[in-house]
Amino acid sequence: MFTTTKSFIHEFKKRLTEKYGVGLDDSHITERYDILGSMVRDYANINWRKSRDAVNKKGKKQLIYFSMEFLIGRLLTNNLINLGIYNVVNKGLKQIGMNLHDLEEQESDAGLGNGGLGRLAACFLDSIASLGYAGNGHCIRYEYGFFRQKIVDGKQVELPDQWLVNGNVWEVRKPKHAVNVKFYGHAETYQKRNGEFGIITVNPTIVKAVPYDMSVVGYRNDVANTLRLWSAEPSDEQLPRDESFDDYLRTLREINHGLYPDDSTEKGKMLRLRQQYFLVSAGLQSAIRGHFRRHKTLRNFHEHYVFQLNDTHPILAIPELMRILLDDYEYGWDESWDIVTKTFAYTNHTIMVEALERWPVRYVHHLVPRNYMIIEEIHRRSQREFVNKGISEGDRQNMAIIRDGMIHMTNLAIYASFSVNGVAALHTEILKAQTFKEFYSLYPEKFNNKTNGITHRRWFVASNPELNKYLTSLIGDSYITNPDDFEKLLPFVKDKKVQRKFLQIKRLKKQQLAAYIKRANGIKIDVDSIFDVQIKRLHAYKRQLMNVFRIMMLYFRMKSDADFRIHPVTFIFGAKAAPSYYFAKKVIELINGVADVVNNDPEISPFMKVVFIENYGVKTAEIIIPATDISEQISTAGKEASGTGNMKFMMNGALTLGTLDGANVEIHERVGDEHSFIFGLTEPEVKALRESGTYNPWDVYHNDHEIRRILDSLIDGTWSQGNPHTFKAIFDEVMNKGDEYLILKDLPAYFKRTDEIVTYYRKKSSWAESALYNIAKSGFFSSDRTIHQYIDEIWHIDKVKNGN
């Protein structure tokens, strides 16, 4: 492969001619991107093959990370940096009149995720490879991803995310590793030759699962792991008698179609269940087949594999491994259960009851009848164990795997897994003390915390090259492989010269974001204004609505008092709402309604602009985060499991404005009150308020004239061109449904804290010191630290290369 600029140029021209039959001058930019991507992929493939051989031939213990999402973003820049060839390629392209950035822009965000769950999984894969360990991800090869968001008349419209329309240069189809996944049919007992009885699934629908593999490149260490994407394709097996071929093809396409089908219908729920089973069955069969070929037994399977279940979606892996061991390899129940309970670890990502997945018994019984039988037996045995251990009837009901015609997937995961972890210190304590207190009392050794992290190599080194270059000039580049070394910046945080340089770089990143907003939104923003940013999945508990109320408050203050003016602020939002989540979609419409009024008011717009960035994803986050001044992390205390956006902002020198929720707690512990802005009720205070039953949002409404004006504006047409009905649903959610997420309760404290942070921003030296201090303390939130903890305390997986 190429090692110099000259050899790169030669190889690039050669491939362009061989594949497309064109020279440089005649080639299209998409062809150039494809050639460059294939060159980088092939460069990585050398390490990829060596890494696989090292793990498999030496029988090393490896991780399989099951997740319905891997929000990996674009890979070109990341792979160039990790392979150590960025400068060679960049220089070579310049010499032949090309711009690397232009080629980078040809790559779409991979449509494999939606939010923090998928971004976390992607960060974990990067850290595992960069630390040199054996760990691979498994997901579905979604044809259309989540959706592409378009804003039409202020409203979210969902369009197909056609990320594969031009192919995926990073993937390699592996048909020889395909497996068959069986749905439907019915389970029957049969007698084996030895006289014992076994169970077989009769007349199933068989789907072929074909893997498409992508290399996950470690940072300059010659290690490459795998992200395996499973695609549903027609099987060679005979169809069931009652199924037409057209129906069969339709069900195949549905599995691959997109992430998180609309679950407001029974059809959508069944499709989600099919996707989940398809993923885990394919992944388990693939691992078991390879292991059995090498070891001729599955009794040591758990010694060579550990499976991390990322949230509730992959939990069907538990009964599926039992089915494979019992039926396909004819192990007994006790021996199979022993293997299962040493194989799976479970990560919980939420305490919200509605997000703790439950499936109707009839769904599972219909879709995977044999697996349902196994779940029934696990339930029966677990209840017997609970009785024998003296667990009360009430607690047994709370811990039941099957209850009221529903299968409680989280209870199944906790019972069968050897490790159950939360993703932030506060979150884990809530799991132990409240959500799963009965399980924690019985199995305290299973529960542990692993505070989430981010890959600083993407979210700092690649996303903020200017700041990365300057930081390297001050403290060296050891933090790239040892993120604790961010703390080497501490002696410089009060240095006026360093502060000025940081502010210069921040302004440059704000100019870049402003240019993007001008192109995408047609809005001109002031680069010297405060960039106040809230970018995350839209949900009521994340309280984007509270942020909008603050903007309304400022608007009404300035309209009613000609002497009241603020330091210019640009409020930037980015969020997708689930297609069936009506309230969230109305909040997006409200944000755009407020933006339309504010941005077009000549009295107000010089001091305040509101921007909603369409189709927010990894690609846009990499532009927004380095430019941010204020990071809005304002969820109701006790509702956000962790959050990782807060860490990305911190690492890029934004100050946190937030509640003591999720990882905000640990950010605050590291930077203190001096360098973060915390407000609002704490989790114990929220709990006590709810238990007291004394909170009534109408009391706030009647006692605070500013808040009353804000709420009235929702139903007087202020933000909806005179239509009083447009935002009535939002008014009702807050006022007539009890203000579930305590927006009005926290609003006065939020108003006060935002005034203080804006005042602090004017003190440029102090602000720069706080921003630099945040960067210096951000190393803890690298996913390298998180992965070290998983490896040391849960996975115990091996290095790819001995001595690496």
Image (cartoon, grey):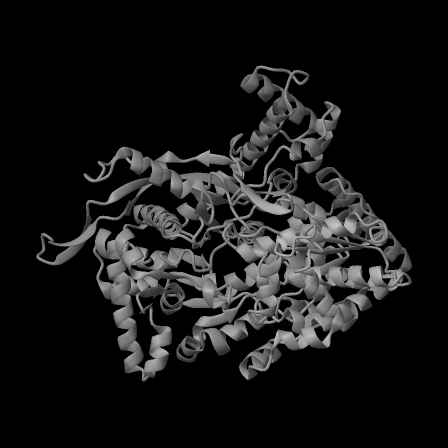
Q: Position of residue 462 (x, y in %)?
A: 69, 45
Tally the marks. Answer: 0
**Viewer-proximal residue, 6 or 188?**
188
User: Residue 346 placed where, x, y %?
Assistant: 44, 63
Q: Does residue 670 appear left or right of residue 729 in this picture?
A: right
Q: What percent of the width, then of the height, locates residue 747?
A: 70, 70
Q: Is residue 511 left or right of residue 482?
A: right
Q: Is residue 86 left or right of residue 70?
A: right
Q: Which of 151 and 299 is in front in this view?
A: 151
Q: Say if residue 455 shows up in the picture.
A: no
The answer to whether residue 5 is above or below residue 343 is: above
Near-viewer residue (177 or 208) = 208
* Residue occupying image coordinates x 37% and y 79%: 395
Left or right position of 636 against 48: right
Looking at the image, is 203 positioned above or below residue 747? above
Locate the N terminus by quadrant. Answer: top right
Nearest the camera: 358 or 169? 358
The residue drawn where x is 74% and y is 41% is 516
- Residue 555 quadrant: bottom right
The answer to whether residue 535 is visible is yes
Residue 213 percent across, percent down from the top left: 46, 39
